[in-house]
Amino acid sequence: MAVPHKHSALRAFLADEAAGGIVLIAAAVLAMIAANSAWAAAYAGFLHLETGPVLAPALGPMTVHMWINDGLMALFFLLVGLEIKRELIDGQLANPARRRLPIVAAAAGMIVPALIYLAITWGDAALRPGWAIPAATDIAFAIGVMALLGPRVPPALKLFLTTVAIVDDMGAVAIIAVAYSQGLDLGALAAAAGVLAIMAAMSRHGVRSLVPYLIAAVLLWWLVLLSGVHATVAGVLAAAFIPITATPGAPDAEQSPLHRLEHGLSPWVAFLIVPLFGFANAGVALGGMSASVLVEPLVIGVAAGLFLGKQAGIIGGIALAEKFRIAQRPKGASWTQLYGVALLAGIGFTMSLFIGGLAFPGEAVLIDKVKIGVLAGSILSALAGFLVLRFARPTHDMTGEI
């Protein structure tokens, strides 16, 4: 099924992500300024301000930072889940033939960075939990960089990067649920499963109002928070049960609850939640660090995984898929342009910072090193990808199809 050129859901999503990515970049810069200025104490004090209540005994009183990472980011993952479901049912991934290349490219683009990270950090067992940090791609940041290039990046490349990143998100959510969950409360998990069953029954019986689904999603979030599985996974699980009516080319279709929720949620996530997360998590005080931190295994592992691993995995995956006739690269795309896209996929910012916090909970020193590695790898990937796409010879026969 071809993607309509004027009003498709994916193109509307790209418009929000491009502008939101630029706002995210600004938020990250502000975080670095705040953490390295006279406002540093106020910045840290605000993030660790206890607001209460105690929603899960294992977590203790909620802080501003926890509300952002465990609460607001659940809405980010809800949007991710909506995008995944919409693409699988009503978009680029609905066609099995079109799924193959993004799946191969995304899988290789997650495996190779993880292997590079493990190869660099293998000598220190305490660092191994961070293997998934360089495996993720930040859609908003990458599309934001693409937006700076204007018409030099054809729509098909933007759609390809987005579908790869969406498949990448599926993998990241699975990793968070399996690898970064601990001390599971089976009673809370059973109750969460009961809420999902109720949502499934509502969908099956034709409930189209979003209100009962959103109430159930809030209850699901709390139960998942109690269970020991990271609470943000609740967002993706809830999205799976939001009803969708296939409406290609009409992202605002009133008859499709999923499209309505996605359209309503997207600006809040792009312009408030993700930038707020970036502001709360990107700040790292550099005053007490020496340049030697840049050659520490954790920093190199994260940065090399993002910058080298992502490009090698994605471009290698595309080449292998084409060689073995699993799938063909986007119509009209040159290898130089695809290489530029593979470089931009090394921008791991939001998801990488998020996974870094899960990998090393309570380890402030390690988390700061993760931030430096993520920033270094993401900035290198952004600059290199921008330059490659800026000077790549443009093609004139690329359509919006993947």
Image (tube, rainbow, N blue to C red):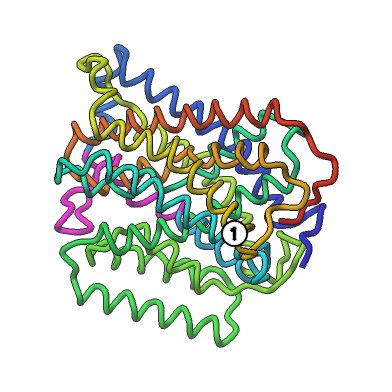
Residue 259 is a magenta residue = no
Pinpoint residue 126: horizontal percent, then vertical percent. 15, 44
The residue located at (29%, 35%) in the rendering is 370
Q: Which stretch did the figure color magenta?
A: 50-76
- Residue that extends furthest to the right in the rendered view of this protein: 396
Q: Give the amino acid type for the residue marked by disc 1 in the picture.
A: Ala
Residue 71 is a magenta residue = yes
Please say if 200 is above or below 11.
below
Is residue 172 found left or right of 142 in the rendered image?
left
The residue located at (56%, 46%) in the rendering is 315
Pinpoint residue 189: horizontal percent, then vertical percent. 26, 74
Position of the C terminus by quadrant: bottom right
How many C-alpha atoms fall within 10 Å of the one at disc 1: few (<14), some, or many (≥20)?
some
Residue 229 seen:
yes
Q: Quadrant of residue 284?
A: top left
The residue located at (59%, 59%) in the rendering is 321
